[in-house]
Amino acid sequence: MSVIKVPEADAAGWRCAACGEELVPRAVELEYLDSVFNVELPACPRCGMVFIPESLALGKMNQVERLLEDK
Amino acid sequence: MRGMGRSLLPFTGKRMDQAELRRLENQCIQEEPPQCVAACPLHVDVKQFCSLMAARRIDKAWGVLAKTLPLPGVLARLCDGPCKAQCVRKDAGGAIEIDGLERFCADAAKPVGPPRPLPPRRKSVAVLGGGLTGLCAAWEMVRRGFGVTLYCAEPGRDLAALSESILPKGVLARELDGLRAMGAAVEEGAEPTPDLLESLLEEKDAVFADADDLPEAMRDFGEPDEITLGTRVTGLFASRAGETSAVFRAAAGRRAANSIERFTQGVSMVTGREQEGPYPTRLFTSLDKVQSVPPIIADGLYTEAQAREEAGRCLQCECMECVKTCEYLKHYQYYPKVYARQIYNNESIVMGTRQANTMINSCMLCGLCETVCPEDFSMADVCLEARRSMVERGKMPPSAHEFALRDMAFANGPKCVLARHAPGADASGYVFFPGCQLTASDPGGVEAAYGDLLDRLGDVGLLLHCCGAPARWSGREALFEESLAGLRSAWESLGNPKIIAACPTCIKTLKSGLADAEIVSHWSVLRALGLPEGAEGGTAALAVNDPCAARHDAALREDVRALLEQAGASLAEPELTGEYTECCGFGGLLSEADPELGRRVAEHRAAAREEDFVTYCVMCRDMIAKTGKRAMHCFDLLYPRAEDPAARPSPGYSARRENRVRLREDLLKRLWKEDAGNGSEPFEDVEVGFTDQAASVMEERRILKSDVQKVLLRARETGKRFVHGGTGHFLASHRPVVVTYWVEFEERGNGYLVHNAWSHRMRVKGGKA
Ligand code: SF4
Ligand code: SF4
Ligand code: SF4
Ligand SMILES: [Zn+2]
């Protein structure tokens, strides 16, 4: 499966508070209603905590959620 | 037109089937033809014609006539407009002068050639007699691809005597040219004789005789059949002699053509012919708000300006009664006949996107459409059934009603539910049931009202519970039953007292759900007891707003008005009121399915009158208050507490929950001297404040204070959070159940100040978010 890149996932200025690391793009699996997507999202390179910005949650992700709910 | 107010549909949870779709499509009459079109013996599209004429598109308007009328130049000038007797405008100034308009159009429009006939069908027919009827029959048949020969002494002999002002020279000749151009042969000078008839019957597939152009002696075939115009002689069709109206003559010609078509095809001569010639139509068009305007009468032909003005009086008849009154129906741009099909299609989809889900979930289930519809079409029934079937088949979008159902579960949870006899009593004659929204919005009002009932009625218990309406509205019948079962057992634990319910939705829901309970409205009890002490009527006139749940409860509406008037209120009625009241946008959980439309509906309602609103449903009160309109609940007047209650903002979702919890705690402590015993959960101890911006987006995004507290607690426990280099804000997330919440915050002493929050339902696989 190819990895979807999302330009909205802009983590500028944020870093992991626990590890002190800058965030780096990482392939993660997002799932909803039995569908799985491979998406590249900013994450902490040490602890792996994934960052989902407001614009992504309310934009693309919300659209996809609605689409899947109407399937 | 009066709705039945069937609040309780038999619950099937089945998909709409073809038969049901057809029944619904037939019930909505919006697509039925207008009166004029149905009354016209030839079914000219008068409505379209008028619309084009009013728009000065005269050539186009002529096209409408020429496509339907045989020999249009002749018919348009000779028709005396029998449709006028049915025109809806006749009761608002006078029928549209359609005959005058047609004459003007025939004169002013650029002539068009005859229609292009259908491909030849290799059947040949004869028309015997060339009066107007015969000419029209020939026209209709040649159009349909018959080989037509017309035998007559002189075509249009019966029109020859007409004056120049009625039928100008050359018009008939031009239409006869058209007839020939379409392929008809015209045998002039062929005086009809019995021999000719006999040989034609032999040689042709069928013969039509224009009885008015035959010698008396030849009419020995008997009176032609009314429906088929068939005669005793097989293959011979004839008009009935003596018709004087031009358009009815033309209609006879068309009827004969239809018969001959059936005859030559060997199909039934009689079935399905009800709509040839004038027929009754079911279309309803209201004259409400239509100003009476008299017709324009001209001595001779209309001028163009007159014609436009006269055509402009046409009402462009349609029904749309429900769409006119319902913002939701308007929003989706069609009408229930179309919506029924969209819902049927939505339910039939196996693979692909269900486009109508939001539409189905946006109906307020308020019943106004059924009340205004001439055919009692209930969009509410259709949408509720569709929701139930979606739930039943697992096709209801999970997010559609979740927030409202979570709120209902909270209201039915241990922190909110209460069932008690009056303090010190061990039995209840009555129990007060304020409902979960009144307790959420105005706990002080509930305390005052309950105190009043205790003072004046005595043995009144208290029952705090949700009536289950959100579950019902969401189509989750099983959940509704479950909520009802909890309510029932609480009620039975009090010894089945009479229920005094304050909220109209509760009253309606309980009446159907707890059918064996005696349910009285709080307002009728107050009316019987007299006004509570201190009741006020307000200083200025108030617009009284009936909630949609009171639509079919005239006694309830009356009680409220009587009470308010006793209190000295002067009441004004919105245009849509009583049985015809409009929903505030809360009904049917519209605000969950489409918050934006919900807001527009509330704004629309709020604009119905200038005066401050007073209503007896707290959701109406809050929905209208949210638009910025001043609005009160009756409790604000009957149990006055605050300075300016009409300006009280609608409490947010979190405050509503806290109000319910606190009300229960306060009442238990004050009246029953008990501690609520709500062991607080750890997250509740997280101290948190919100910027205005954060509070407002949380409300919009349906994020509760408790959701935020859970995130913050989790971040505190795990230390997992992001930090922003510029602002120093932290960001943490947590997924309590099915939604992941993100909170952007800063630390403030022991607590937090929240700047922003958002959520999503997708989950990071293997991750915590
Ligand atoms: S008002 Fe117009 S559309 Fe209605 S019946 Fe009369 S002519 Fe027809
Ligand atoms: S919102 Fe009310 S009036 Fe509109 S379609 Fe639904 S039930 Fe009918
Ligand atoms: S009121 Fe609405 S549902 Fe009823 S016939 Fe008219 S358009 Fe159709
Ligand atoms: Zn980390």
Image (cartoon, coloured by chain):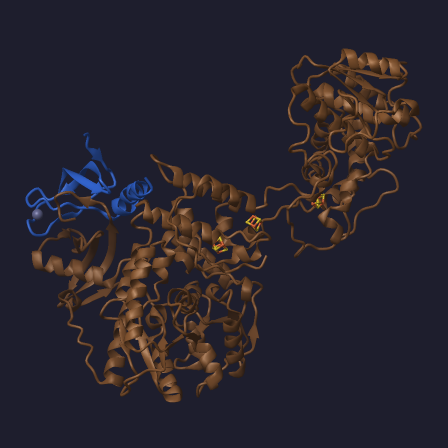
The chain painted brown is B
Which residue is farthest front? B232
Looking at the image, can residue B305 be seen?
no
Quadrant housing residue B754: bottom left
Looking at the picture, how far across and down is residue B164, in whole percent?
Answer: 91, 29
Q: Position of residue B28 (x, y in %)?
A: 56, 46
Residue B308: x percent and y percent? Answer: 74, 41
Question: Measured from the top left, where is residue B411 in percent x and y?
Answer: 28, 67
Query: Could you say which is closer to the camera, residue B510 or residue B539?
Result: B510
**Can you say which quadrant of the picture contains the C terminus of chain A?**
top left
How many numbered markers are drawn? 0
Q: Residue at x 33, y 72 (%)?
A: B439
Residue B561 vertical placement versus B254 (above, below): below
Name the side, left or right, on which B358 lies relative to B306. Answer: left
Vertical comparison of B246 with B660: above or below: above
Image side of residue B508 versus residue B371, left or right: left
Residue at image coords 47%, 78%? B524
Note whether B763 is above or below B580 in the view shown.
above
Shade of chain A as shown in the rendered figure:
blue
Q: Residue at x 22, y 35 (%)?
A: A5
In depth, the one of B322 and A20 nearer the eye is B322
- Residue B208: name its quadrant: top right
* B221 sits to left or right of B674: right
Quadrant assignment for the N terminus of chain A: top left
Residue B491 in view? yes
Residue toward you, B233 or B368: B233
| Residue B300 vs residue B476, the one in the foreground | B476
